[in-house]
Amino acid sequence: MSNAAVDPSYTCPVGAHNAAYDIHGTIDAHNGTSKEVTITAVQATLTLAAVKGEWLQKVGEKYVAANATYSPTSVAAGARTTLTVTIPSACTGRVKGAPVASGDYAVSFDLTTSVGTFKTASKNRHQITTG
């Protein structure tokens, strides 16, 4: 598992409160074994790495999305593929007239497979801006 990436940004609508949206990620996978590898679960962890302006969370706080969806669910023997991951998230926008703020999240992935657990981190951060 390598070369993970996520959507670079999302602008939360003004006045939104806990509004659902999806973060999309990709992970390059290579199966160097002689047997198919099945992926049984993907968990994404978003860790607040930096903020600008007033933000509801503190740097270092984590959000764990244990219910991320992904495709494909297996990698054939000797094959390379790119996994697509959808991470459910939510945001709260600013009150109209309030200053714009943003939070930058480092994203890591834990993949549970038929041959063990693998961890990889996104090469970029996901930024939420309070439009």
Image (spheres, rainbow, N blue to C red):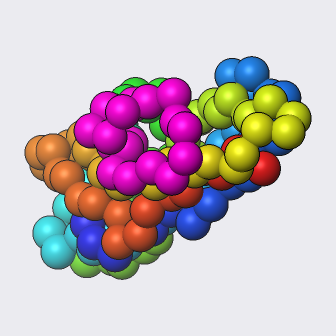
Q: Which residue lies furthest to the top in this view?
A: 17
Residue 11 seen by the camera: yes
The reply, left or right, for residue 14 in relation to residue 58 is right
Residue 51 position, x and y percent, is 45, 49
Q: Does the magenta stretch include residue 102?
A: no
Q: Foreground: 62 or 98?
A: 98
Residue positioned 55% across, 38% down in the render: 54
Q: In this view, does 82 lie above or below 119?
A: below
* Occupied quadrant, residue 99: top right
Quadrant for the N terminus in the image: bottom left
* Occupied quadrant, residue 5: bottom left
Residue 34 position, x and y percent, is 16, 69
Residue positioned 41% across, 69% down in the render: 124
Residue 77 position, x and y percent, is 27, 69
Q: In this view, does 47 lie above or below 61?
A: below
Q: Give the range drawn in magenta.
A: 45-63
Residue positioned 74% across, 22% down in the render: 17
The reply, left or right, for residue 79 in relation to residue 125 is left
Q: Foreground: 68 or 125?
A: 125
Q: Foreground: 56 or 66?
A: 56
